[in-house]
Image: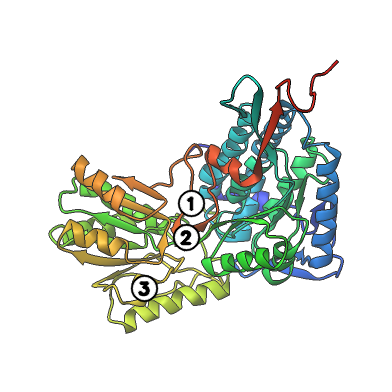
Amino acid sequence: MADLLTRDEYLAIAKELSFPSNAHINGKFTAAKSGKTIPSINPATGETLTQIASCGEADVNYAVKKARQAFDSGVWSRKHPSERKEAMIKLSKLIKRHRHELAVMESLDSGKPVSDCATIDIPETIHCLTWYAEAADKIFGQISPTNDDAMGLIVREPRGVAACVLPWNFPMLMMAWKVGPALASGNSVIVKPAEQTSMTALRIAELAAEAGIPAGVLNVVPGLGETAGRAIGLHPDIDVVSFTGSTEVGRYFLDYSAKSNMKHIVLECGGKNPAVVLEDAKNLDNVAEHVVNAVFWNMGENCTSNSRLIVHEKIKDDLLRRIIDKVRDWRTGDPLEPNNRLGAMISQEHFDKVMGYIEKGKKEKGKVILGGKALKIGKGLFIPPTIFDNVTPKMTIAKEEIFGPVLAVMTVSSDDEAIQLANDTCYGLQASIFTSDVKRALRAARDVKAGTVTVNCYCEGDITTPFGGYKQSGFGGRDNGLQAFEQYTQVKTIWLDLSDSGIDAKLD
């Protein structure tokens, strides 16, 4: 696989790594004002990698002050878009130069397979930042239709100070999804990484300073959600918060907005996403490959995980045999071994939560046909691919987001039943439809209530397509595509009176 090193090479990099540990505010690393720290633990070994600054309200206040000063000064917000583009492209090049270091750092911090970090997360991070950099000087305003005596200009302006609150499952990539359009449109940005995975965000902030992004424009404030996150949500001088994470936490930001300055809130939250395999689906080997990737990629710690397989009764047994055969290629173990497809669960708390769902599935009479027990690999937190058959809609594992490598198989006898079951959820983030009939595909894609629907494949679209959810999966906007700029900009109307009557607006 391209750009992959050997395990020994990755171990050598790991031994030489210098882990960033302090907040990065106003272009400099700085300890939390309280002196408090959070341990960064490698979930594959239980080893404490370093102590990360645990920022609180005082640190957030300082970061917002510096971000606002930078914005008001115009050092970034009033730069020509092509100049912002140049600095962001330089940042992308620096990330590429340090890609092996960043891949190992992310793998150690999160338990993700280094192969995913190296071949998916980092290339997509670079592509995302470059794409938005290139878009920075290609977004035009509009002129409204008027008579000769007036002109209406419709322009977009940066909101000001944007806060980006990140999840722990794709730390670098989700940072790029948010920071890319926020910086390209001229905002000052404060990033609050998940407390479990702060290191790559801090390192990228350091590289941003090296790339020439001015002090105060990109700040990283690590800390707990109930301290740093809450302070961000309630701060009266933050103009927008873009959050990716659980629906439960997303609700807090709506509440914080209402209690403070009614800042704009964009939420990308949870999902209980279906893979719907209709009776006429062909090439079941290909379907099985997509189903396995959809639910087990990134250990199932993925908001678009197709954790519900809704399959027609006539092809279910054949498809399940093929799925189980495909899973044999998904080895679980040391994340720094490039041949391993699954790594460790992010934390002991999350490991216990996922195992709790597995035990709940057994108790509620789900039939385990694969996995179902934790793996003992040193002191790591490893759960193998687990598949439940005979799952009914009322079972807990059919309703709640597990965020782990667990597939719930549900059997149907018609297209209508499949679509009804697919929509039987409070979420609506992503869905995959498999069929050989284009009319069936289009009807199903229209009828399923989800922000992204893919046909005969599992994916999330690409950087050009907006990403977000229906119902409790999303609120207030979209990541990706040109639509992401709407999160970080305000629309302004400038009306020019060109008539000879009334106030004389002629210029001498």
Q: Nearer the viewer, residue 325 or 211?
A: 211
Marks 3 and 2, how far apart at CA: 18 Å
Residue at x-position 26% and y-position 44%: 442
Q: Are marks 3 and 1 in contact (CB under 8 Å)?
A: no
Dot 3: what SS? helix
Dot 1: what SS? loop
Q: Nearer the viewer, residue 113 or 351?
A: 351
Return the residue at label 3.
397
The reply to whether residue 4 is visible in this rendering is: no
Q: Are marks 1 and 2 in contact (CB under 8 Å)?
A: yes
Residue at x-position 81% and y-position 71%: 36
Return the residue at label 1.
468
The kind of residue tagged 3 is: Ile
Image coordinates of residue 491 in percent, x first then y, are 64, 40
Q: Which mark is residue 473?
A: 2
Residue at x-position 30% and y-position 61%: 422
